[in-house]
C-alpha cells in the first residue's frame, strides 16, 4: 500500500501522543515513558514512529507538569513536533487539552496513541488511515484468546464468554469534529478509552485488526518484551549516486543552490526552483533504496510542482529512506560551475542541507569545482551537481 494514498488530499493528519501519566504500576522513580530502551526513552521510540511516517503532518504530545526538561531531551531534534500540552488529572482530560489546542477542519484526521506503545508498525498505521477514508472512528484491537473468568475473594466465579470480545489498542483514529464533539459533550466524565466517548454518542467505531507486537509497557516485565521487539536490526551500508544539471534561465538577482539564494545574474531553468544540488541529493537517496528518481516521484508534467521549493522533494526522499528503516550517515557532493563562486556560501549551504535532512552538518560535504572552461559548464551555460549518500539499512530492506 502506498502511504501517500491512505489520506484524503484535503485532510490534515495529526497524531496526539498521550504521555502525561505517572506510570504507577510500572514501579519506577520516573514515569515509564521516560525510561530507556536501547539508549532511547520509550517516548522517543514512540514519537519516531509517527515522525517517520510520511502521511503524518504534525504531532501533539501531552505531558505532565514538572517533566518539561525530560520531555525536551526525549524529543530533541525531531521534526513535526508541536509545543507540548500539559495534561490533566485523567487521560480524558489530557486528550481534551490536546484537542483544544489544535485548529483543524472537521474532516481532518486525528490519531490518538499511548506513549507507552513504542512497538507500533507503519503497517498498522496505514490500515488505520485506510479505514478512516470510510469511517468516522476506528481503532486497532485484538480478539481475546485467553479463557476469561471472574473472581471474588480470590475464588474463581463463572467463565466469561470470550467470543466477540476484543482488547483495545492504540492508535485510535477519528475525524476531528467527531472526537472533539465527544470530548466536549462528556467533559468531566472519566472514560479511559477515546472510542468509548464516540460510542456513547451513537457513532459506530470500526475495527482494525491490531498486532501482538503493539504491546503497552505497563509492568516492569513488559520492558523485556519491548527490548526484544525494538532490538536494532542488522544493518548494512549502501550508497546512492545522484547527478543533476540545469541550464541558466531568465535573468534574476539570485540563484538557488543547496537551498541558499546566492547573488547572481540568472536563475536556473527548471519546472521547480531548479535547485541542482538538492535534486542530486534527492536522486541519490531514492537510489539507495532503488525507488526510482525525482522525476518518477515528482514529474515535471504535474503543475502542482511548478516553482516548488526543492526542499519538499528532498524531505520526501529522506522520509522514504527512513520508512525503510534507513539511517543517513554521510552525504558527499560536488557542484560543477564557473559561476557563481560557491566558496563564500559553502557553510550556509552545508547548514541548510543539514537542516532539511535532519543530519549533523559535520556529515555533509559540500565541494565545488570548475571544469577548466570545458563543456557546457565551462561555457557558463549551466550548473551540474553530483551527490553520493551513505545509508545504513536493515539487511532485508
Image: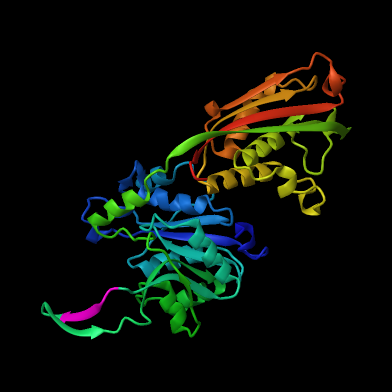
Q: Which residue lies furthest to the top in this view?
A: 372
- Quarter holding residue 278: top right
> Whole-percent x and y of residue 279?
71, 37
Q: Is the magenta stretch mostly helix, strand or loop?
A: strand
The one nearer the camera, 353 or 151, is 151
Give the number of callouts. Answer: 0
Q: Is residue 391 above or below residue 229?
A: above
Which residue shows up at 54% across the image and 53% down it?
53
Task: Give the magenta-colored segment's residue range.
Answer: 146-151
348 left or right, relative to 369 = left
389 left or right, relative to 198 = right
16 left or right, relative to 162 = right
- Quarter holding residue 292: top right
> Whole-percent x and y of residue 9?
67, 63
- Whether residue 258 appears in this view of the structure is no
Which residue shows up at 87% across the image and 20% down it?
379
Which residue shows up at 37% across the image and 44% down it?
40
The one nearer the camera, 71 or 2, is 2
- Whether residue 375 appears in this view of the structure is yes
Q: Does the magenta stretch include residue 124?
A: no
Amino acid at each position: 500500500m502506498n502511504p501517500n494514498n491512505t489520506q484524503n488530499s484535503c485532510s490534515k493528519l495529526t497524531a496526539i501522543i498521550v504521555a502525561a501519566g505517572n506510570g504507577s504500576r510500572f514501579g519506577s522513580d520516573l514515569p515509564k515513558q521516560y525510561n530507556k530502551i536501547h539508549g532511547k526513552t520509550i517516548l522517543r521510540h514512540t514519537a519516531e514512529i509517527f515522525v517517520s511516517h510520511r502521511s503524518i503532518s504534525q504531532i501533539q504530545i501531552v505531558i505532565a507538569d514538572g517533566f518539561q526538561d525530560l520531555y525536551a531531551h526525549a524529543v530533541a531534534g525531531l521534526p513535526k513536533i508541536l509545543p507540548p500540552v500539559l495534561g490533566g488529572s485523567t487521560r480524558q482530560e489530557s486528550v481534551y487539552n490536546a484537542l483544544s489546542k489544535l485548529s483543524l477542519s472537521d474532516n481532518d484526521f486525528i490519531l490518538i496513541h499511548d506513549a507507552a506503545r513504542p512497538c507500533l508498525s507503519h503497517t498498522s498505521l496505514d490500515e488505520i488511515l485506510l479505514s478512516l477514508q470510510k469511517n468516522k472512528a476506528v481503532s486497532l484491537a485484538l480478539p481475546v484468546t485467553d479463557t476469561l473468568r471472574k473472581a471474588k475473594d480470590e475464588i474463581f466465579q463463572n467463565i466469561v464468554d470470550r467470543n466477540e470480545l476484543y482488547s483495545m489498542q492504540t492508535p485510535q483514529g477519528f475525524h476531528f469534529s467527531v472526537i472533539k464533539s465527544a470530548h466536549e459533550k462528556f467533559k468531566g466524565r472519566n472514560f479511559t478509552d477515546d472510542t468509548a466517548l464516540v460510542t456513547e454518542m451513537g457513532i459506530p467505531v470500526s475495527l482494525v485488526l491490531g498486532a501482538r507486537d503493539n504491546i503497552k509497557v505497563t509492568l516492569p516485565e513488559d520492558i523485556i518484551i519491548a527490548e526484544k521487539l525494538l532490538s536494532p536490526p542488522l544493518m548494512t551500508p549502501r550508497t546512492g549516486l545522484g547527478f543533476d544539471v540545469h541550464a541558466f534561465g531568465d535573468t534574476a538577482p539570485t540563484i538557488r543552490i543547496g537551498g541558499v539564494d546566492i547573488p547572481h545574474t540568472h536563475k536556473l531553468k527548471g519546472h521547480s526552483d531548479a535547485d541542482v544540488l538538492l535534486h542530486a541529493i534527492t536522486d541519490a537517496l531514492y537510489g539507495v533504496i532503488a525507488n526510482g528518481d525525482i522525476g518518477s516521484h515528482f514529474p515535471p508534467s504535474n503543475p502542482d510542482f511548478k516553482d516548488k521549493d526543492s526542499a519538499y522533494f528532498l524531505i520526501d526522499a529522506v522520509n522514504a529512506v527512513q520508512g525503510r528503516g534507513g539511517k543517513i550517515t554521510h552525504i558527499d557532493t560536488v557542484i560543477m560551475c564557473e559561476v557563481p563562486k560557491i566558496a563564500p556560501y559553502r557553510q550556509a549551504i552545508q547548514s541548510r542541507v543539514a537542516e532539511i535532512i535532519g543530519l549533523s552538518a559535520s556529515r555533509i560535504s559540500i565541494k565545488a569545482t570548475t571544469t577548466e572552461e570545458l563543456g557546457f559548464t565551462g561555457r557558463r551555460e549551466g550548473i551540474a551537481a553530483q551527490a553520493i549518500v551513505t545509508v545504513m539499512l536493515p539487511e532485508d530492506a
